[in-house]
Each structure stands twice: as C-alpha cells, then as structure tokens.
Amino acid sequence: MLAIAKREFKSLFTTMTAPIFCAVMIAVTGIYFIAYNIGTGYQKFSYVLLSSLFIMMIIVPLLTMRSFSEERRQKTDQLLLTAPVSLGDIVLGKFFAMCAVFAIPVLIFCACPLIVRSFGEAKLAGDYATLLVFFVIGCFYISVGAFISSLTESQVIAAVCSIGAMLLIYLWSGLVNMLPSTASGTALVLLLVLTLLSLLLYASTKNWLLAGGIWLLGALALLAVWLVNSELLAGRLSEWLGGFAVTTIMSNFGEYDLFDLQGLIKLLLATGLMLFLTAQSLQKRRWS
C-alpha cells in the first residue's frame, strides 16, 4: 500500500494535477480570508472554510478523475490488478495519496487562525475543529470521486459525474426538505432509495445474489415497520437523511461551535462505504 501511495503521490505532482489543485484551493480560500478576516475583522476563520466548501465540489474531481480511469484507459491497471497486493491496498494507497495532496493546503490554512490571533481575539478551538471536519469532508469527496473514476475509462466522464455527485451532496440539506413527510410517502421514497442502492451495488459487483439479498432484507424490514406502526415512518425521512448533509455538519462546527461527533462519524462511515464500493468495482475488473 505504501509503495502505491508513493507512486500515486509522485504521479500527481509530475502531471501538474496536484500543484494546480493546491494553488486553486489556496487562492480561493486566501481571497475569502482577506475579505472576511483581514478586511472586515471577523474573528472566526471557520467562516472562510464555510464559504470555501463549494470549491471542493469543482476542484476535487480534478484530483480524482484520473485515479483509476486513466490507468484503465492506458491498460496499466492490469499491472496493478495482477500485482501481489490486495485490492484494499490498491484503493487505500491511491486514496491516501490524494488525501495527502489535499492535506497540503489544509496544513497551510492552519496558520490562518494564528494570523487572526495576532491581530486580536480569535476562536482557535472552533477554527481548528472546523479545519478537521473540512479535511474529513474533503476526504469524503475524494472517496466519491475515486469510486466514480473506477467505473469509467474516460477522465471527462469521471470529472463531470463527480461534479454532479458532489453538487448533489452540497445541496443535500435543501433537497431533503422537499421530501414527503407522510408515512406512505416516506415508505415509497425509502423503497426507491433501497432499489437505487441495490442497483449501484450490482453495477459495482455484478453479483445479483448480493444486491438482491440486500434489497430483500431492506424491503422486509420496511414492511415490518409498516405493519407494526406505519406512523413511525412519518416525518422520519428528512430527519434521517438530513443527518448526512455536509453543509449542516460543517455549520455545526463553524457557525454554532458544536463538536458534531455524530456527523463526523457519519462522514467517516460514508467514506469507508465509497472505498468499499471502489474495491468491489476493481474486483469486477480483475475477474472480467
């Protein structure tokens, strides 16, 4: 895994992908920092990170679009898939390399709260907690982009689909509020989500038994809840899905000074799920 991570990290800087990524992240965040903290005297650097969150859905695909698709296009993925390493090591090696690149601007941002402190009062604890969740959200976006890159050999398709997926994640809190609040509407939407997830799992694994089994278990659980007390589902959909909104989690840290441990754990679990699906996608390629 370490050898793959070093190879990928070096490759990202050789192709100018990493320098451009770091430059754009630092430039955009720096502009907000000058405007908010230096220009208007805001004490919280976390406001800058909240405003910079949108740039990740545009710039992260630049980092992830070639992670697997380019190797697939050039057929060099066969060397990885036949190497005496596990698929988990391949996925984690590439993932950690991209996270290391993302960590470079984040480490530079760590100096910003200290600069604010040099001019007067600063909220260091809240700012550094927000930096932590900002990095975790970035890693989550990287895992999403890596998974999409593993599904195609076209970098353009990988980039466009990644931007679309990350835009959906960014707008998640607003979209969740549009969901039905009735028990029947909640049940139908949950069944639809379960079906889509099962189809996504099948697309990654080509295993009807696994995908169908998960769908059947989920459908039976939903039916059992409906038969016992359907009103348990009323209004729950927005509550459940709203907990995965990255903007809400970020706001809890940055605006309200709340250490949202539950939200942080959800982000880590979602990142792990994306990495698992990426490994399954490579597994399909190995045996195809």
Image (spheres, helix red, strand yellow):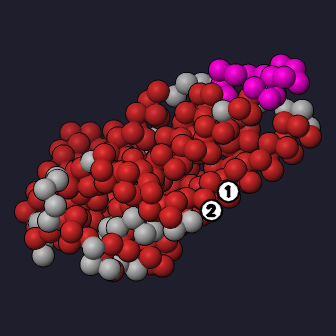
Q: Residues within 10 Å of mark 2 (few under 14, many from 20)?
A: some
Determine contact: label 1, label 2, CB under 8 Å: yes
Residue topped by disc 1: 23
Magenta-span inclusion, residue 199: no
Residue where numbered disc 2 is placed = 20
Tell me the kind of residue under disc 1: Ala
Asked where in the image residue 283 lies, by quadrant, the reply is bottom left
Residue extending farthest right: 39
Give SS at disc 2: helix
Q: Is residue 126 magenta?
A: yes
Image coordinates of residue 75 in percent, x first then y, are 27, 78
Residue 189 in the image: x percent, y percent?
A: 36, 59
Can you say whether 184 is above or below 256 in the image?
Answer: below
Residue 200 appears in view: yes
Q: Position of residue 198 (x, y in %)?
A: 23, 62
Residue 251 place in picture, x, y as percent: 63, 37
Residue at (88% x, 24% y) in the render: 119
